[in-house]
Image (spheres, coloured by chain):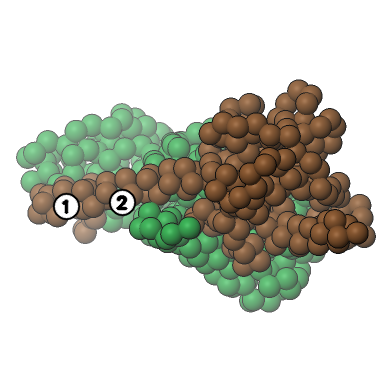
Chain colours: A brown, B green
Amino acid sequence: MVVSLPRLRLQLESESELLQGDQDMVNESNLSMDLTEAFAGVFESAKRNLVVVQNGHRGAGAGVIWRPGGIVVTNHHVIQRGKPKISLLDGGEFRAKVIARAKDIDLAILRIESPERDDVAFPGALIADSRDLRVGQIAFAIGHPWGQIGAASAGIISGLGSVPVRSKRGTVHVIRTDVRLAPGNSGGPLMNASGGVIGINTMIVGGDLGVAIPSHVVNEFVEEQLGQETFQAAM
Amino acid sequence: MSQNNGNNILSKLSDAMANAVEVAGAGTVMVNGRRRLPASGIAFASDLILTANHVLEREEDIPVILPDGSEFSSRLAGRDPGSDLAVLRLEKSVAELAIPASEEAHVGQIVLALGRPSPNGIQASLGVVSAIGGPVRTGRGGLLERYIRTDAIPYPGFSGGPLVDSSGKVLGMNTSGLSHGASLVVPAGLAWQLAESLAKHGSVRRGYLGVRSQPVEVSAAQQEALGRQQEGGLLLVSVEKRSPAEAGGLMVGDILVGFDGQAVTDPDELFVLLAGEVVDRPIQLEVLRGGQPTQITVTIGERK
């Protein structure tokens, strides 16, 4: 009778492959160190383009410097009431002007009111193309959940689809993610493995499902609205 | 932004997980068997879908939607409320197969929970294997020989869908129907075994031997007599009257060490072996009797 015992095989291997095993262990621990550093790197660089958006009432949301020089994208519901103020993570608080808002897709565009409008003071985020995302890809979020400034969380893209909206758009593309989000993440970036912004975190459904508006939808909105702004300024 | 090594690692990991979702998603179908939210299913043969028993409210005309969006009707081939498994038979052999993992899940392993509760594409969540346990009494009066717990978020409609490893191989089937709504995973080895039984017989036939036992050490001398390293066996402490064990000649004091060519070292292993395709089959058991290996053939009964 032939009996194969997993435990037995393990014992035999453990002796002959002890040295090899040690080497593998070292390589694996390097790999996880590299991964940990890579995670930290993404969040470190994301902080440069992350802002706190205060609406003058209680609570604050997050925002992303979408274009260098101080064009900030956040959620509409973050700036719904009151005059918004924006602060950077390394200090500095500014008044902000609402340039455009779209309630249906929960987006708003703000301009930081500051004499400096250069991209050194307000560097723009790297915006990634969100049209070729795949379910399972890593997703990072950074924001201010429950008032904790610049808090990081990680997960994956859980689903891609669209939801109906009450406007002439009819539907809007959304990214669903299992990244743990909380109030205060609203308006903050959802990022891919390279740190590129793939969306703006918008909703938390049922406590464990985050929904983000993809970057290509945000880009269309920004281009559409900034075009108008320029035109109005020229009058 | 510059692409440093770290980002390459992250991008590789990210792509690998997306690939795993794609591979496993091809064998993950949508099962529309209840009034509320649709649930998920795993194609374990081209015409057989493994799903959760509790997501089926009827036995006929159950629509199954494949990853490409095509819809096929199916009917219930068998169900086992005790393990919350059910098997659907498709009207045609059209499903792309899910691949079960060759190794069992281990604690700490990175896993993805998958589901297809809508026709708009696969859904996934990331986590690790939190615990492996069993046997456990389930909420439906059954006994699950083995289970996996994970911290991956079980989204609504994930019941019946697979838990997969980072290469997309199936480690088990997700269900919220066994543990008061909490998510539990039935390991792939057990699920596939039960599913085959369900497809063949319509129910799970569990084998009955008729012994009580306790695990004991097998001494070095006995291992030598056996001709293999096996540190444990099952000491039979009672043999039930008119049981298959008695009919086959098993005796109190025998140490059961083998079952149909498989080593037996603890009661759980015997339990799992008896859940296989063994009812009414003569099975060769190996026991230590007076320290000497003895072969005994027992025709396994059915546990009622």
Q: Residue at x 60, y 42 (%)?
A: A50
Sort mark 1 into few (<14), some (14-19) or many (20+) by Cα contacts within 10 Å: few
Q: Tell me the quarter of the picture where residue B242 sits.
A: top left
Q: Please say whether residue B64 is visible from this viewpoint.
A: no
Chain letter of the residue carrying label 1:
A
* Kind of residue at badge 2: Leu
**Residue A38's spot in the image, x, y percent?**
40, 49
**Which tag, 1 or 2, sits closer to the chain's start?**
1
Q: Which mark is residue A163?
A: none
**Residue A61's spot in the image, x, y percent?**
70, 34
Which residue bears the numbered disc 1? A23
Q: Residue at x 64, y 76 (%)?
A: B94
Q: Which residue is drawn at 67% across and 42% down?
A: A115
The quadrant of the rendering that contains the C terminus of chain A is bottom right
What secondary structure is found at the residue carrying circle 1? helix
Q: Please say whether residue A145 is visible from this viewpoint.
A: yes
In the displayed structure, B156 sits above or below B21; it is: above
Q: Nearer the viewer, residue B1 or A42?
A: B1
What secondary structure is found at the residue carrying circle 2? helix
Q: Are marks 1 and 2 in contact (CB under 8 Å)?
A: no
In the displayed structure, B92 sits above or below B118; it is: below
**Residue A79's spot in the image, x, y percent?**
80, 36
Q: Residue at x 18, y 44 (%)?
A: B230
Q: Tell me the quarter of the picture where residue A98 sits.
A: top right
Q: How many marks?
A: 2
Which residue bears the numbered disc 2? A31
Q: Distance between the residues labelled 1 and 2?
A: 12 Å
Seen as rendered, the residue at the extreme top is A58
